[in-house]
Image (spheres, rainbow, N blue to C red):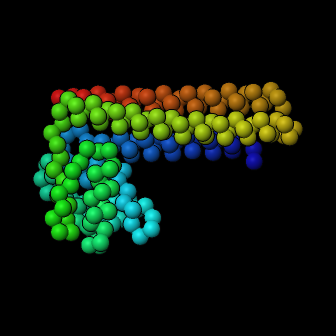
Amino acid sequence: MTEATDIKELKRRMDGAISAFKHDIASLRTGRASANILDPVTVEAYGSRLPLNQVANITVPEPRMLSVSVWDKSMVSATERAIRESNLGLNPIVDGQNLRIPLPELNEERRKSLVKVAHDYAEKSKVAIRHVRRDGMDGLKKAEKDGVISQDESRAQSDRVQKMTDEMISEIDRLLADKEKEIMQV
């Protein structure tokens, strides 16, 4: 594996962490109800964890209400539990095989709670990017030790990896600041 390919692979993995972060913060609601709010919810089903949209249909019947129609009657309580424990501040109301989820008004406390969740998502993404950097640095050290690349080349590649890491983390910080501003707007 050449160093250039290694750098491209590291960049691809870091971009993956950023796109996962974008997806996560898109699920944080700022105004009207959206089925995306429930994207981070996973349900313990059939011996594994499945995304909610694989065990139920999610609709938005009203601007402040979500409706979740669970396909398998035996999964209703597991789905309700997953939504309650999702750290989204939602309390589903069971109605047969359907769950009605009224969305609470975004008061100051709830907005601060959503900002905290956004910060948690950002921190997870930063950790993922740092893991990618560590993998890259370990690969460079091994290549230098094995004599595949020179010490100078290893330093140059390490600097490129660090610069790329710094750029990715500042991108996450920028996205987080934008989302925080969006959430806190009244």
Nearer-the-camera pick, 109 or 64: 109
Q: Quadrant of residue 166?
A: top right
Q: Quadrant of the C terminus?
A: top left
Q: Position of residue 91 (x, y in %)?
A: 21, 50
- Residue drawn where x is 36% and y is 36% of the image: 118
Q: Quadrant of residue 80?
A: bottom left
- Residue drawn where x is 46% and y is 34% of the image: 123
Residue 157 visible to the viewer: yes
- Residue drawn where x is 60% and y is 39% of the image: 131
Q: Position of residue 79 (x, y in %)?
A: 30, 61
Nearer-the-camera pick, 100 or 125: 100
Residue 66 visible to the viewer: no
- Residue drawn where x is 30% and y is 42% of the image: 28
- Give above or below for 8 relative to 35: above
- Give above or below for 133 relative to 61: above
Is residue 78 rendered to the left or right of residue 64? right
Q: Position of residue 163 (x, y in %)?
A: 60, 27
Q: Position of residue 113 (x, y in %)?
A: 29, 34
Q: Quadrant of residue 89?
A: top left
What is the number of callouts on the image? 0
- Give above or below for 139 relative to 77: above
- Give above or below for 90 relative to 175: below
Is residue 155 rendered to the left or right of residue 16? right
Is residue 94 rendered to the left or right of residue 85? left
Instruction: Residue lying at the far left in this picture: please name it.
Output: 62
